[in-house]
Amino acid sequence: MKIGSIRPQDEFLADTWQRVYSNTLAAAATSVTISGLDGNTAEEYILRARIINGYNGGAEYDVRLNNDSGNNYGHQYLGATNSTVETSRNTSTNKFYSGYADALNQISMFEQNIYAKSGYIRTAITKQMPRSVSGTTCASLYMFGHSWNNTADNITSIVVIADKANGIGIGSVIELYAKRSKI
Amino acid sequence: MRVGKLNQSTSGILNAGVYQLVEEKILTEAATSVTFSNLNGDVDQEYRIIGRFVNGYNGGENLRIQPNNDTGANYGYQNISGINTTIAAARDSGLVSHNIARCEALNDLSLSDTIIYAKSGYVRTFLSKYCSGISGTTVNGIYLSGGSWNNTANNITSLVISASQANGLGIGTHLFLFKRNLLGTEASSGMKTGDLNIQGSLNCGVMQKIYQTTLASAATSVTISGLDGNTDTLYELRARIVNGYNGACGIYLRPNNDTTDTHYGGQKIYGSDSSAAANHNSGAAYYFNGGFSTLNQLSFTNCFMYSKSGFIRVWINTGAEAISGTTVGYADLFGNVWNNTADNITSLVLFATQASGLGVGTTIELWALRKKI
């Protein structure tokens, strides 16, 4: 069927990625919760964020699934700061470590692919590129592989958290894309 | 409402919260720069540029992006790269552009994927990955790069893609510009519809999932057939693989099931525990992912490929591998090449190096670019 421009007002199921959440913060926050999700149906999510540091100092940005704050996560990263290559593994942490900014108003941008369907441990890949951006200085970048060892629970929420009060500053943009399969 | 195939008009906009191809450029003569114009970054907010560059210059060059053709010293980057067995990091600031690709010699290739946060109000940011200097079965380098443009005020109305050397954008260079579209409930133009449940091809300039399987029994290979790489041009292969073999196992990707290992090559960087390294492989089979060591470990890999014939075929993989419980064995980035320039890709085969290596629960998806027709 030939169509022109369209604007579906309801569900759009077409085996594509669709933005299901978008938030540009008008006030600083310490956490942002994306709720009402169904990870078993979506199967995969892409979380994309451009965070403005709202804290007057270094702030870390993390992601938790279903707000699970237990030490049920792990990661392996590969990173770069100036001319130094860094890599490390952590097998007992309480988050997907997803971004960082050194100082107030610096920018941290990340893209996170999450395999969300239950039945197996959940996996994710995060590209933190760039971090601690100010003017023409991009202080570092990192690529992470993550795991969350929960095999059973449907993911119904994704929480983006700053480790400092109001670390997710005004102007921060957080968006979630879900896979929308035809039925 | 269930509908079959949708084919959108050339000027049609799919206001459904998707990324949509707004323009592509295929160079029929060499150029030093090309421009995507008539943009509105403040409305679009984000762009994605995919480029398969052909070097039109007889030597090394960088391929760059400059919003609004700004050639001032207003850009910076931090990158990590792998060239042969050397992994390295670099940062610079006060530059005149952001590099999104690199070629090393006349007629070699580079494949690039860049996300741009375009809305004004803050420094604009770039997120790029690219493999460079690709010729025959050699991928010279692989890069991750984060960049910035320090202009906070000006609406982005154009994106200029340029070569650092004259006529460096050679014949066959192919560029795709995607933009972030509004949701239907946010848009003020276009025909309103209710729910849509598309059963057929969505020929609207979007990436659409065209194949999905979840293995109910272990397999040594999975073949995705019935493809037309020359029409589709871009594929994204996404897989969450469960190791079905009781030991170390790797997974190859073979277009058209070409089993001649010497037709492939690649370059990779990876981190494993406290070790970072780079690997180079030319004229030998190269892994789609290769990090399993024990039964039931997982890997999660995203791969995008330029599939059209005429030049050697290239793809980039991003992966997390050898995952068990809260242990992630590897984080890695691969650039890969298949030296076949002629054959249309009609199938993609994921092949385990050990019997039944694709275990129960493995999920494999292929997404293809569905252009307007």
Image: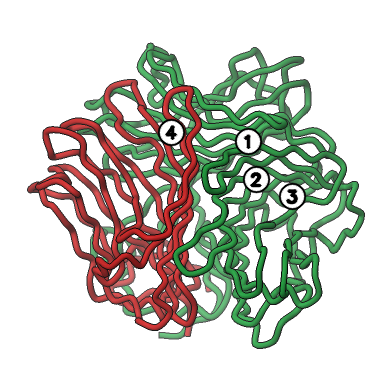
Chain colours: A red, B green
> Do marks 4 and 2 share a chain?
yes
Q: How far apart are marks 1 and 2 (CA)?
A: 7 Å
CA distance for labels 3 and 4:
28 Å
Task: Name the chain under label 2.
Answer: B
SS at mark 4? strand
Nearest-to-viewer mark from 3 and 4:
4
Q: Earlier in the sequence, mark 3 or mark 2?
A: 3
The one of B165 and B105 positioned closer to us in this rendering: B105
Q: Which chain carries label 1?
A: B
Horizontal arrangement in the rendering, residue B119 relative to residue B104 (left or right):
left
Visible residue check, residue B174: no
Tell me residue A143's x, y (percent).
Answer: 47, 45
Closer to the eye: label 1 or 3? 1
Whole-angstrom CA distance, mark 4 to mark 1, is 14 Å
The amino acid pointed to by label 4 is Gly
Within 10 Å of the Cα at label 3, are there few (<14), some (14-19), or many (20+) other Cα atoms? many
Numbered circle sitting on residue B332? none
Residues marked 3 and 4, same chain = yes
- From the top left corner, tell me how far across and down residue A118 is, in percent: 44, 80
